[in-house]
Amino acid sequence: MTPDSAAPPTSRLSHLTGATRRALQGWVAADGERLLFVVRMLAAAYGALWLALRLGLDAPLTAVATTFVLALPSSGMVLEKALYRLLGTVVGCTAALTLVALFPQQAPPLFAGLALWIALCTAGAAMHRNQQSYSFVLAGYTACMIAVPALDNPANVFALAVTRATEVGLGVLVAITVHDVLLPRAHGPQVLRTVQARYERFLGFCRQVLEHRLPPAEAELNHLRFAADIAALESGRAAAFFEAGLGRAQTRQLHAFNEAFMAALTTFYTLHRLLHRMRTGAASPVPALVAPLEALLAQALGGALAQSGSIAGAPIDMLPAALAQQAESARTQLPPGDERLRIDFDTAVELAERFARHLVTFVGIYHGLAQKKRMQVSEPQAYAPKTPPGIVAASGARAAIALLCGATLWYWLAWPQLSNALLMSTIFCALASGSPRPTAMIKQVLTGFVIGAPLTYATVFLLLARADGFPMLMLATAPLLCLAGWLTSDPKRAGIGIGMAMLSSQFLAPQHLVNYDAGVVMNSLFAQTGGVVLAYLIFTVVLPEHTMGNRTHVAAALWREALSACTARLRGQGARLRHRFDNRVRDLLSQLNAAAGPAPSPEARAVVRQGLTLLELGHAVIELRALARATGADAALDPALRAVADYLRVPGEPSCRAAVAALQAAGPAVRTALADDPSSLRAALTALHSIHTSLQDQLPPPTYPLTGVIHAS
């Protein structure tokens, strides 16, 4: 008899019940969420359609399409996108009224004005992120959707604008009501789970690095992913702000968490690079002397990961003091009279203590969020994204070219339905401009159009034509809309679902005077699909390398940001400049991460390494500029800062050597200028040393001096 057969029936029943419960929980967490998403999407679509028909609106399809556009996983995301959709619609309607008033029944200047407006809006979308970007895109193509139909009848443009705004407003109201009432999914708890996962991953990463269990190449990839996490958390925080469950104080804490994370990550990277250089360079006793500090930090990280918040039995707040005590003990073991080793050691200690202070702040803010404690945090600064100017200009140019090409074909072929192709090509050229893989995105949408076209035709003429009353209309259209919603809820096939939903919504929402004309429907299906094809061709032919995350543009932008750290206006202690510089560099790395995918190429990895080096250099430069202003040591530091700026302006070996020489000359001058201020002197020498070692990485290893600024200091 086997053990299973010998088990009592109650034990087997409980085991079966437990397995069933786990399977059910897994289904609810995966497919169950998707099913609820489809239910909410259909409820919003049919609710908007019923209200539009009852109110006698001219084009109910706009209200239905709005509910599809606002079909997002959480209520916070729906509320955020709804606000920006309303804003973009109002701005687009205003632009359309202005352009038609300026150029009534004048096609060439009207299309030229629309092309310019579309280009400006699409360029603005490329410069922003999340739903702010969508608002710019919407303002652009809304003007096109109103002005083009009014070309032959400009007196009707105001009615078109009012109708568009009314129907979008109706769709927005229905969508936010349904997604906030019908089995809503709040975004706030999801953001807090993301915070917990980020906290644990960052502390685990730092601990692995300090215990030498992570190769340098893998550490660089982690920095790239962390840059993407920063942008993602900012997006989630913005969406959660619109929910009632997440107050203003908690959103400020999320902002403070992101800022504390960036500060700790930057300092840790600088410390890690310094220790790595010392271990791989000339033989030095400093790494062995710093090893106890690394062990202390790793122990603190382990305690924080275990939620104990303690280090060696003491609160984690005592970590900086424990590091200082350990550093004083290790300093006595330095060989006497060796200035180079002393500066190496002091720089490592300064960075370790700075990281400890940032870690204490980071852990404190996290526990405040986890325990839902209200904390006093400073007024957060807005997230400052950065898009390379070449990509911004190319995004606007492509959208304008799409509009002009569609208008030319419309005029040349005299095909009435080509106005739909014009609108579709313009819309998807604008929408795809913010994607790191625009051709892949448009290809997915095109697949949705190709699959949805025959299904839409069959639904209209085989089911919808026989439907009598609104309930039968729902039964006739539900299969196609359910399929579109199910595909939309799958991240890998979301583009296909969106394409099907957008195409079908143009035909399945009946007008007040229904006219089942097979020729018109087929022409419209072909024209709209052709518009998406035109958008794909434009991205393939017109400046295909000028897309978000292109490593060549990102690399050039990283150098420009490092130069701005040297030349931009410095206010106060440089907090605003430091925040903007850090945000922009990490946003560029986030774009690179999105374009590179899960397995970055060697060329992308090289850009990551260069970007992290420039991030380290830029922060050290800002630190030096702030110290020079606060202590009056401008005369001692300005020549070195100018030389570094010259190198960043024209990178090359001669300018790099000139910058290294200027840093070497700055050492004695700084010692003289700050002789009465030991803490400022230590901070200045640490920043000088960080810049010097960063520049050494740019020189051929056999030729650059090993002592550098350390001997000079």
Image: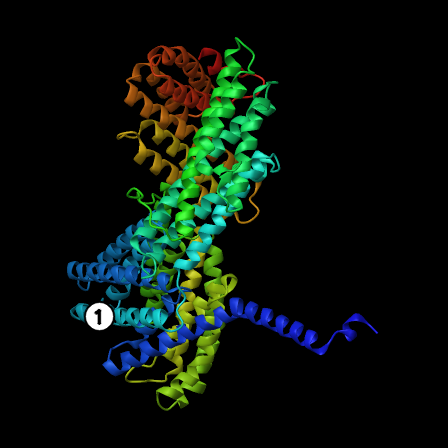
Q: In this view, does 519 lie above or below 466?
A: above
Instruction: Choose between 271 and 306: the one closer to the eye.
Output: 306
Q: Is residue 124 above or below residue 11?
A: above
Q: What element carries label 1?
A: helix
As drawn, which residue projects farthest toward the right?
1
As drawn, which residue projects farthest toward the top?
337
- Residue 413 placement: quadrant: bottom left
Q: Is residue 178 above or below residue 92?
A: below
Asked if residue 490 lies left or right of residue 642, the reply is right
Task: Let me know if residue 225 appears in the view.
Answer: yes
Image label count: 1
Q: Which residue position holds label 1?
A: 160
Q: Where is residue 122 in the image (x, y as percent from the top left)?
A: 33, 52
Q: Position of residue 520 (x, y in %)?
A: 37, 78
Could you tell me which quadrant the N terminus lies in? bottom right
Q: In this view, does 555 lie above or below 172?
A: above
**Residue at figure coordinates x 56%, y 16% from the top left:** 333
Q: How crowded is mark 1: few (under 14 residues within 10 Å), some or many (20 or more)?
A: many
Q: Position of residue 638 (x, y in %)?
A: 33, 18
- Residue 135 placement: quadrant: bottom left
> Which amino acid type corresponds to the residue marked 1 in the rendered image?
Leu
- Residue 424 placement: quadrant: bottom left
**Residue at figure coordinates x 53%, y 41% from the top left:** 303
Could you tell me which quadrant the C terminus lies in? top left
Asked if residue 138 lies left or right of residue 604, the reply is left
